[in-house]
Amino acid sequence: MPDDAWIGETAPYLTPREPGRADAWTDQAARRGRRGGQRLLHAGEAEAPEPVRAALGLPAGERAVVRRRLILLDDRPVELADSYYPLAVAAGTPLAEARKVPGGAVTLLKALGYTGAEVVEDVSADLATAEERRLLELPEGGAVLRLLRLTRTAEGAPVEASLMTMPAGRHLTYRLPVP
């Protein structure tokens, strides 16, 4: 596998972290002898793009809380991760603040009473926008994968929709328990 290739797993990002443990990305990178990190680009209320709005069941014009991060591997950009939360879930919480959330969002959501019970992921490919090319350091005409991950509670309430944009060379690996 080339040095810049990466195979990612979904499960660690859906599991609340124990107190004092690094976030899932930092932990996963460290287990592979690499350095994972992220830079928070924005946190607060915003309008969600149509696919996210539809996934969360938000009416047109209703805002959501968003956390936009640039994900780094060995100090190089590898992914844009925009996580959106309904205002009823995240307004007035650390998710809406421009600071690190200890243990990550899934840990905080559990503490707030929202535990994910179902996850649906939709993957598509497209050409990168100018902003995506700039942030991910892609050439003109560079392609990206877009992964939209929707997390719902056992009652079916959507609590998080994450839109991840990554260079097309990424691989996604899924490990699912057999019932």
Image (spheres, grey):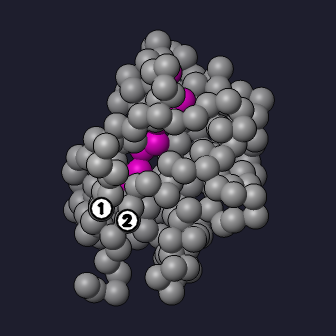
Decide: is 1 above or below 142: below
Q: Quadrant of residue 78?
A: bottom left
From the top left corner, tell me how far across and down residue 14 is, in percent. Answer: 50, 48
Asked whether residue 66 is in view, the answer is: yes
Residue in the picture at 29% in, 67% down:
170
- For the C terminus, the image quarter is top left
Mark 2: secondary structure: strand
Asked whether residue 133 is in view, the answer is: no
| In the image: residue 102, left or right of residue 27 | right
Residue in the picture at 55% in, 79% down:
30
Mark 1: secondary structure: strand
Does the magenta run of residues contain 29? no
Q: Are marks 2 and 1 in contact (CB under 8 Å)?
A: yes
> What crowding class fits label 2: few (fewer than 14 Cα within 10 Å), some (14-19), or many (20 or more)?
some
Q: Nearer the viewer, residue 172 or 154?
A: 154
Residue in the picture at 32% in, 52% down:
176
Q: Nearer the viewer, residue 112 or 41?
A: 112
Residue under label 1: 173
Chain part drawn in magenta: 157-165
Residue under label 2: 8
| In the image: residue 119, left or right of residue 168 | right
Give the number of the disc on residue 49: none
Dominant SS type (magenta): strand
Q: Nearer the viewer, residue 62 or 73?
A: 73
From the top left corner, tell me how far across and down residue 91 is, in percent. Answer: 71, 27
